[in-house]
Image: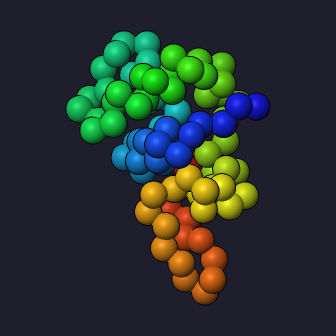
Amino acid sequence: MKQPNKEQLDALVMYAAEYGARWKSALRHAWETGDYEGFEHSGWMQTIRNEFGPSWLVQFNLKKVLREGRQEMYFNHREKSNGRPAVPSFKL
């Protein structure tokens, strides 16, 4: 499956942090209505929709991407503790 680039993944992480466990439902709704409720990176979210589409979102597992260490490659807000990449503390 095609994966988002660094900027797209950063935007997804920030969106998930803002909307919590129901972030995918909120994003699907935003994609359907065009209303991102003032989300700072709405342009990236629309780009993700145009590039990947709603069916991709169903299969995409942000938690798995972060767990597999791809955040080291993508995630802007890297901090190391105990030699391991930091994973956001919010629930996905």
Is 47 above or below relative to 38? Answer: above
Question: Which residue appears farthest toward the top when viewing the image?
Answer: 33
Residue 17 placement, left or right of 6 = left
Residue at the spot 63% in from the left edge and 77% down from the top edge: 84
Instruction: Identify whether 73 is placed above or below 14.
Output: below
Above or below — where is 51 with respect to 69? above
Query: Which x, y percent locates residue 74?
Result: 56, 52
User: Where in the figure is residue 49, as x and y percent of width and height?
Assistant: 51, 21
Q: Is residue 34 left or right of residue 77?
A: left
Q: Is residue 67 visible from the viewing direction of this image?
A: no
**Total residue callouts:** 0
Q: Is residue 37 left or right of residue 26?
A: left
Is 18 in front, or is 85?
85
Give the image quarter of residue 53.
top right
User: Residue 36: image x %, image y %?
Assistant: 32, 27
Instruction: Identify the residue at horizontal 66%, vertical 36% (top origin).
Output: 3
Query: Which residue is situated farthest in the left direction here?
Result: 38
Front residue of 33 and 71: 71
Could you say which quadrant of the image residue 37 lies in? top left
Judge whether 71 appears above or below 84 on screen: above
Name the spot of residue 47 as percent of width and height, x first: 46, 24
- The scheme the figure's colours follow is rainbow
Give the residue at the far right of this rendering. Answer: 1
- Could you tell me if residue 69 is visible in this image? yes
Q: Does 21 sit left or right of 68 as displayed?
A: left
Seen at 54% across and 70% down, the residue is: 86
Quarter in which the N terminus is drawn:
top right
Tell me which residue sits at (66%, 55%) in the image.
70
